[in-house]
């Protein structure tokens, strides 16, 4: 049982390492905005299946990004000097993230394409410009989270 519980500690340590990666933080921030708009407001109408699809595709993108980070770490360990095959492995890992992310965008557009929801969103922000300012401030906060403004390397 202790071994099983330790595995969670290792997994959370890996998650913390992923959060050091800018691209992982980018995916987290985008996901937070998507789920925030879906959960806080009732603009979008989703079935349970659509919710499941969004959660699964989000998890898939984050998992592929984590695998890519792991591949890059192993390649850097195995080949600290520049080598064409090392670069190739890293590029292919990045391509996997790109393909998965593009698929997630398409899935998101298919599920979330609800013109009436976007009209309601536009009307909401038009009537409440202060909320638009808060959204802008949150975007600055998201940029700080993603690009680590003020972080020491």
Image: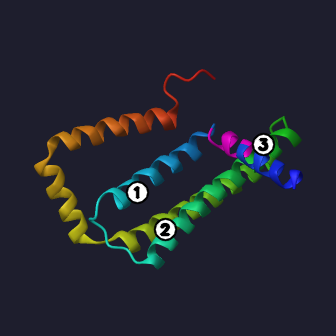
The C terminus appears in which quarter of the rendering? top right
Q: Is residue 16 magenta?
A: yes
Residue on which disc 2 sits: 54
Which callout, 2 or 3, points to the residue nearer the camera?
2
Alpha carbon separation for disc pair 1 and 2: 10 Å
Which sits earlier in the primary sequence, circle 2 or circle 3?
A: 2
Q: Secondary structure at mark 1?
A: helix
Which callout, 3 or 1, points to the residue nearer the camera?
1
Q: Secondary structure at mark 3?
A: helix
The N terminus appears in which quarter of the rendering? bottom right
Is 28 situated left or right of 46 in this image? right
Is 40 situated left or right of 62 in this image? left
Q: Residue furthest front?
A: 1
Q: Is residue 137 magenta?
A: no
Which sits earlier in the primary sequence, circle 3 or circle 1?
A: 1
Residue on which disc 3 sits: 73
Residue 50 to residue 153: above or below: below
Residue 90 image point, x, y percent = 72, 49
Q: Please give the range of residues in magenta.
A: 13-19
- Residue density around tag 2, few if under 14, some if 14–19, many if 20 or more, within 10 Å: many
Residue 99 to residue 30: above or below: below
Q: Are marks 1 and 2 in contact (CB under 8 Å)?
A: yes
User: Residue 34 has which mark?
Assistant: 1
- Residue density around tag 3, few if under 14, some if 14–19, many if 20 or more, within 10 Å: few
| Residue found 49% across the figure and 35% down from its top | 145
> Which residue is more in the foreground, 37 or 151?
37
């Amino acid at each position: 049982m202790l071994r099983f519980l330790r595995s969670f500690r290792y997994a959370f340590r890996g998650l913390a390492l992923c959060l050091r990666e800018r691209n992982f933080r980018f995916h987290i921030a985008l996901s937070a905005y998507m789920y925030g708009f879906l959960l806080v407001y009732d603009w979008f109408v989703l079935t349970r299946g659509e919710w499941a699809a969004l959660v699964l595709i989000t998890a898939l993108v984050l998992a592929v990004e984590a695998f890519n980070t792991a591949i890059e770490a192993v390649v850097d360990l195995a080949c600290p000097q520049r080598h064409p095959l090392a670069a190739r492995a890293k590029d292919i890992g990045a391509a996997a993230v790109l393909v998965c992310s593009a698929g997630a965008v398409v899935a998101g557009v298919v599920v979330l394409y609800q013109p009436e929801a976007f009209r309601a969103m536009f009307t909401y922000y038009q009537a409440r410009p202060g909320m638009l300012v808060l959204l802008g401030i949150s975007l600055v906060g998201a940029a700080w989270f993603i690009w680590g403004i003020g972080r020491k390397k």
